[in-house]
Image: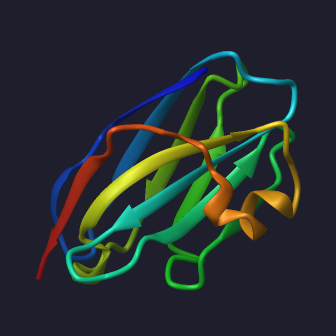
């Protein structure tokens, strides 16, 4: 079992920044994908950014250049730095893990992430 706990959500005005954190614990392997997803009312779930244990990253088209995913040296916290936020970034943000995978698998297998956190709300006002 893998446990994930998100924090750092909140309300911000357009153009502002937020940093989300995801604490990862439990039975992870030496090679893992961890990703951030978001779910907005009336929209389908969207893969925002992914990172593997080796630091390889990938981003969704809507956030590339504005968001940065990173992992701490202990490989237990994954961050999502969100800059230049827009109202359309408003959503519930979830952290998810896919143990035993790395590289392109992290962003080619959005539907296979099998461990999820409870989510944190991000609201961007215009």
Q: Quadrant of residue 96?
A: top right
Q: Is residue 7 above or below residue 45?
A: above
Residue 100 x %, y %: 84, 37
For the N terminus, the image quarter is top right
For image coordinates 60% across by 62% down, the residue present is 49
Foreground of the two, 83 or 90: 90
> Which is more toward the observer, 12 or 46?
46
**Is the image coloured rainbow, by chain, by secondary structure, or in one colour?**
rainbow
Q: Position of residue 3 (x, y in %)?
A: 51, 24
**Which quarter of the picture shows residue 42?**
bottom left
Give the total number of marks visible in the rendering.
0
The relative height of residue 2 versus residue 69 in the rendered view (above or below) is above
Q: Is residue 91 above or below residue 60?
A: above
Expressed as whole percent of the image width and height from the top left, the position of residue 86 reads: 28, 80
Q: In percent of the image, x 32 and y 45: which residue is there?
A: 119
Answer with left or right where residue 113 lies relative to residue 82: right
The C terminus is located in which quarter? bottom left
User: What residue is at 47 percent from the left and 60 percent from the top?
Assistant: 37
> Residue 122: where, in percent of width, then height?
23, 58
Q: Please report the residue visible at 83 percent of the width from the left and 60 percent of the height from the top.
A: 105
* Relative horizontal placement of residue 13, taking residue 105 as reference (left or right): left
């Amino acid at each position: 079992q893998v446990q994930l706990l998100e924090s750092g959500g909140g309300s911000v005005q357009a153009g502002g920044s937020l940093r989300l954190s995801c604490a990862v614990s439990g039975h992870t392997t030496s090679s893992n994908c961890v990703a951030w997803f978001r779910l907005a009312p009336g929209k389908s779930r969207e893969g925002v950014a992914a990172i593997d244990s080796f630091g390889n990253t990938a981003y969704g088209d809507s956030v590339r250049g504005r968001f940065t995913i990173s992992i701490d040296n202990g490989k237990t916290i994954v961050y999502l730095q969100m800059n230049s936020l827009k109202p359309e970034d408003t959503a519930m943000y979830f952290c998810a893990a896919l143990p035993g995978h790395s590289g392109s698998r992290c962003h080619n297998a959005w539907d296979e992430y099998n461990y999820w956190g409870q989510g944190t709300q991000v609201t961007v006002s215009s």
